[in-house]
Amino acid sequence: MSEFIPTGIELSYLVATALFFLGLKDLGSPATARKGNVVAAVGMLIAIVATLLHQGVLNYEMILLGIVIGSVLGAIAAYKVEMTAMPQMVGLLNGLGGGASTLVAIAEFWRLLHSSETVSLDSSITMILSILIGGITLTGSLIAFAKLQELMSGSPITFPLQQPVNALLVISFLVGSGYLLVSPKDPMTFLILTGISLVLGVLFVLPIGGADMPVVISLLNSFSGLAASAAGFVLMNNMLIIAGALVGASGIILTQIMCKGMNRSLASVLFGAFGGSSKVSGGSARTGSADKSVRSIDPEEGAMMLGYARSVVIVPGYGMAVAQAQHAVRELADQLEKLGVDVKYAIHPVAGRMPGHMNVLLAEANVPYPQLHDMDDINPQFEQTDVALVIGANDVVNPAARHDTASPIYGMPILEVDRAKHAIVIKRGMSTGFAGVDNELFYKDKTTMLFGSAKDIVGKLVSEVKQL
Amino acid sequence: MAEGLIAALFVFVLATLAGAEVINKVPPTLHTPLMSGSNAISGIAVIGAILVAGERQWNLTVILGLIAVILATINVVGGFLVTDRMLQMFKKKEVKA
């Protein structure tokens, strides 16, 4: 019997691991994604139940109570959250996972501290890594959450001597780690290391903002997995190590896709802090803007252009998410289709604040999947498009990215809206996008502007189109 | 002990490579669900939390472990449910299309 249970637990972990792999594989294809999610959830259930059977686990009542509390809170959050708030939801969940992993490492340290066991070099190293990754994930995610929830400014926040301060913290962390390796039972050093990790997480996300958020969110997603893996090293538990590594890998893949979508390296996103700060050489476009003029129209005129077009491509951006305009947009598309207009959606890989943000919103509004087109797919089609309707997108449609080498967004792949016969841009005002660059598109002769909140304007367009 | 660490590193590296292979080439529509679904899996920290909270007496280790159990369970349950909610929307629309 005493042999049977530990073996049974390990075998259950093996089954759970297999289910995680199969689930993630299914999550990668639209037809099987929902099943994949359920498969992974079953794997998680098996892993949790098996762990409860562990001989060292005696504190059932409290643990089950904790699970119940966590489940209720998690379920409430999952059902209440608005689809537009999905980026901050994912950000917060990343942080909770990272926080849990850190607490596991701290708890294990505390246990070793008060036991007669000698602490091996291995466990010291793994504990240090665990609090470092977990701590950064926790506070970094909380800052990302605060930025996305607009509890604080979403733009990059920089302060003087930022890089030296970071360097100093990293050096202190290394020195502290060295000290802890020599005298592993020193709680003060351990606490200081934990504190430094938490501060590093804050400083890591503060200077990043706006359109770089998809990169940060996917990177923190990867970190939350690595944190779980590190906790697995502390406890020498294969289940934690493997599951964490899986998440780490998927987060890194998404991070790469996001960086590619902006044509920026990960390093430049993490350390660049572009936009917001005035050092950016957006000057070439901005100085000229005084003598350029934009053409503004009213919704009635906009509706005429759209209603009598043969083909319309809708380009949604973060502005649509902020205004929660996705349902109005869908209604507009429906009305246009009734008039025989061919309607498509063009989705830039980094539109919004997390990977796939626009896809989720449009899915919520029941936009048929085949109408959504990726950047590579839709760009050759703009030349045959009568009207491109840009809703709350800015930098991802700025033609300067193609030719203005002085522009900070030069080289970023864009949706080539300026190649369409006409462009209508719905925007709250003439403010610049996240990159702090003026958008050439707005000043083109064939571009017209509709100023106002995306939801109001699209609503007015719908009623005007109905009257056509 | 060092042997255990090396074995664990093997497991980690192989799992990362296998994971990267499994997840590669995901269409943009599924980026968010993939992220929130894998995020739920990172709540696997819950089993580490259960293990350290297992002792039947009150001390800091157990208290920290229990807090970790709550945080990680929110991560697991919230992550899987919100992913399912999103994928349900995709489903509905495919039937229509």
Image (cartoon, coloured by chain):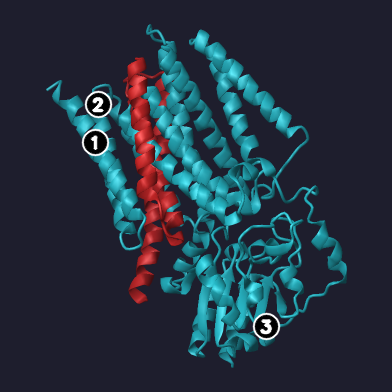
Chain colours: A cyan, B red
Spatial separation of the CA atoms under disc 1 and disc 2: 15 Å
Q: Are labels 1 and 3 on one chain?
A: yes
Instruction: Name the amino acid, label 2.
Output: His
Quarter holding residue A66: top left
Q: Quarter of the image containing the C terminus of chain A?
A: bottom right
Q: Position of residue A119 (x, y in %)?
A: 42, 11
Relative horizontal placement of residue B17, taking residue A447 as reference (left or right): left
Pointer 2 residue: A54
The residue shown at (62%, 30%) is A199
Q: For the residue carrying disc 2, how many other residues have a C-alpha within 10 Å: few (<14), some (14-19), or many (20+)?
A: some
x 39%, y 65%: residue: B90
Q: Quadrant of the N terminus of chain A?
A: top left
Residue A299, numbered label: 3
| Residue marked by disc 1 | A14
Three-letter amino acid code at the position of disc 3: Pro
Could you tell me which chain the residue with mark 1 belongs to? A
Under circle 2, the secondary element is: loop
Residue A432 at what x, y percent from top left?
A: 74, 61
